[in-house]
Image: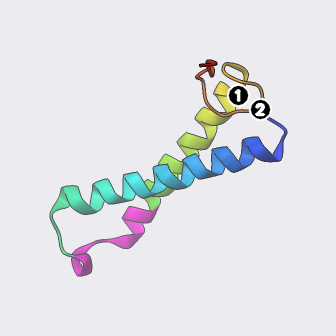
Amino acid sequence: MWTGNFWKQAAERAVKTFAQASLALLTGDGMGVLDVNWGDVASVGALAAIASLLTSIVTSTVGEPNDPSAVRRTNP
């Protein structure tokens, strides 16, 4: 967990989670772009990103060493 690679992967997951949560709010509400409360969208996206980072930290000891995933890689 204390490597740059771990934090790069965890940050990538958090950014993707932010985007997914934000997109879910935007498309699920059926509102136009000008009608959206962007503060709410950013708040929900940030909360989802924090949850993603915390999940990466918690699972750092489960899967591969220095990897935020809980899945172990298998050799083909």
Q: Determine whether the residue tagged by mark 1 lies in a helix, strand or loop.
A: helix
Q: Determine whether the residue tagged by mark 2 lies in a helix, strand or loop.
A: loop
The residue singled out by tag 2 in the image is: 66
* Closer to the eye: label 1 or 2: 2
Q: Residue at coordinates 45% horizontally, 60% vertically from top-left?
A: 43
Which label belongs to residue 5?
A: none
List x then y, in percent, for residue 1.
79, 34
In-front residue for pair 14/71 = 71
List x then y, in percent, for residue 58.
66, 27
In-front residue for pair 67/38 = 67
Render colour scheme: rainbow
- Closer to the N terminus: mark 1 or mark 2? 1
In-front residue for pair 41/5 = 5
| Residue projecting furthest to the right | 2
What amino acid is found at the position of numbered circle 2 in the picture?
A: Asn
18 up-or-down from 58: above or below? below
In terms of image quadrants, where is residue 33? bottom left
Q: Is residue 5 left or right of residue 71?
A: right
The residue singled out by tag 1 in the image is: 60
Q: Residue at coordinates 63% horizontally, 35% vertically from top-left?
A: 56
74 up-or-down from 10: above or below? above
Q: Residue at coordinates 38% horizontally, 63% vertically from top-left?
A: 41
Gap in Å between the C-alphas at discs 1 and 2? 7 Å
List x then y, in percent, for residue 49.
53, 49
Prevailing secondary structure class for the magenta stretch in the rendered image: helix
Q: Which residues are magenta?
A: 33-42
